[in-house]
Amino acid sequence: MSRVFVFAAGGGGKGRSWKWRDMLRFAHISQCADLAASIERDYDSLCVKQPIGRELFKLFCQSRQDLQNFMSLLDALVFETKLDDERLDFGFNLHQCLSGEPFTQYQYSMFFDRFLQWKMLERQPITKQAFRQYRLLGKGGFGEVWACQVRATGMMYACKKLEKTHVKKRRGEAMALNEKQILEGLDSRFVVNLAYAYETKHFLCMVLTMMSGGDLKFHIYNMGEAGLQEERVRFYAAEVCCGLMHLHRKSILYRDLKPENILLDDNGHIRISDLGLAVKLSEGGLVRGRVGTLGYMAPEVVSHERYGMSADWWGLGCLVYEMTAGHPAFRARGERPKAAEMERRIQTEQEEYGDKFSKAVKDLCSSLLNKDPKERLGCRGYGGKEIQCHSFFKKVNFRMLEAGLVEAPFKPDPRLVYCSDVQDIEEFSAVKGVSLDQSDDNFYSKFNTGSVPISWQKEIIETGCFKELNTFGPEGSRSPDLDW
Ligand code: ADP
Ligand code: MG
Ligand code: MG
């Protein structure tokens, strides 16, 4: 198998198709009437959550004398150092004012017209023609993951392709849809984001944040002596903790925490990936079901009990242990115990702490690896906050971390490929004897929803396309393309 490797950068116009302006050409405002009539007029969604919506509302406010101060206050809020509660109150009052008369007026302005035009672009159907495909990144249960690039913007992503016949043969429909639906509801810098979901004749595709720095398994075991320096353990553990808290706030239990599911980006930050086993719990609910990878399953999962978020905090304990020790908590390096023996160890054996463990990291691990889920750190009523307050994280400023303002202690070398022999990964081919029919189309149409709004809007802004295209002609919003 030979392939041409092309590395193209994201922003700055690099990697965009020469036809990019045509691909992102605004519809005439008269063609946006249906959208205008049907779009939900919700201030929070239109002016705060959606990045392009926020930009246009900001431009609107800047165009009005009486609102200019509001906007600078709102911007300042992001980097404000006041106490949390004070800050929240202040922000709340600000939004309270803006969501009244200004929001009403905004909807009659050319800025809102422009927002609708962007939304029309966002809602264009997505096919494989929207992307260039580059190198193979990895292989999963139902197919492969490839590096890809959006032709219109130059943005790089990872495309997880599920082979339709494989999914059908192994009855993976519910799992695939579950992963896609959970991902599209998330927006965290510590969880892989979904940008597009589309289908081709043979594949279902999820286009995800590109994580080119390899997984933690590789970094723990293949970069010299097994294990990581405590600074790195602290940093990754802190980011994973934030990622889990984001999921838990949305009542999502992840269930598959292990080093190979934690991926690094090229700046050295991590994201949780592979949400195929995640479940949405009903409020305060519990689930049953032995899922996950045996070596990382919590005692309550192993023993078929009902469980909740406690299972993920156990997983974090396993992860911190393995990063520090250079081997999993209940298995020596190279050892392959039978399933029954693994279960026994998880349920009854006390893990051992060698001299790689400082007092603080040992205390953190043993509190997370408490066999009793009610006594476990993170499960005693305060959730992940309790973990963030542990002495091991004393040096970590979680607000800065959440804002993306902390630099990673290790930055992957952009010239290296952090994975073992992608070349050896066999190519996926269709399963013979499986035919696809009408009932499959029903499932595919639920999957095939195109661009995910917040991710798409971020992409447009980050790649500079927004700045270049969002110009206003003398007549207002209708003539952005007169100048070229
Ligand atoms: P599965 O659910 O089938 O196990 P994964 O989501 O784990 O599939 O993806 C399979 C492999 O593809 C991963 O082990 C990793 O090597 C690679 N991969 C997955 N997601 C990304 C990503 N966002 N960026 C880079 N590589 C990825
Ligand atoms: Mg996987
Ligand atoms: Mg999976």
Image: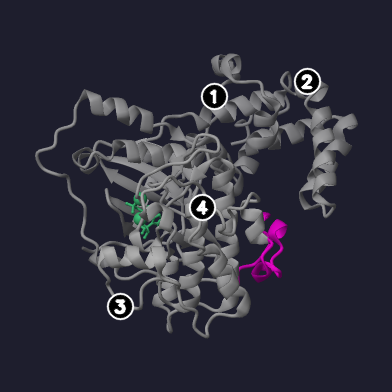
Q: How is the image coloured?
A: one colour
Q: Residues within 10 Å of mark 3 (few under 14, many from 20)?
A: few
Q: Which residue is mark 1?
A: 27
The amino acid type found where label 1 is placed reads Ala
Q: Which dot marks residue 334?
A: 3
Q: Which residue is mark 2?
A: 105
Q: Main secondary structure of the magenta part?
A: loop
Q: Which comes sooner in the sequence, label 3 or label 2?
A: 2
**Distance from Cα at disc 1 to Cα at disc 3:** 60 Å
Q: Which residue is mark 4?
A: 310
Q: Residues within 10 Å of mark 1 (few under 14, many from 20)?
A: some
Q: Position of residue 85 (x, y in %)?
A: 81, 45
**Distance from Cα at disc 3 to Cα at disc 2:** 66 Å
The amino acid type found where label 3 is placed reads Gly
Disc nearest the viewer among 1 and 3: 3
Disc 4 + disc 1, Cβ < 8 Å? no
Q: Residues within 10 Å of mark 2 (few under 14, many from 20)?
A: few
Does residue 397 belong to the magenta stretch? yes
Disc 4 + disc 3, Cβ < 8 Å? no
Residue at left offset 73%, top offset 27%: 474
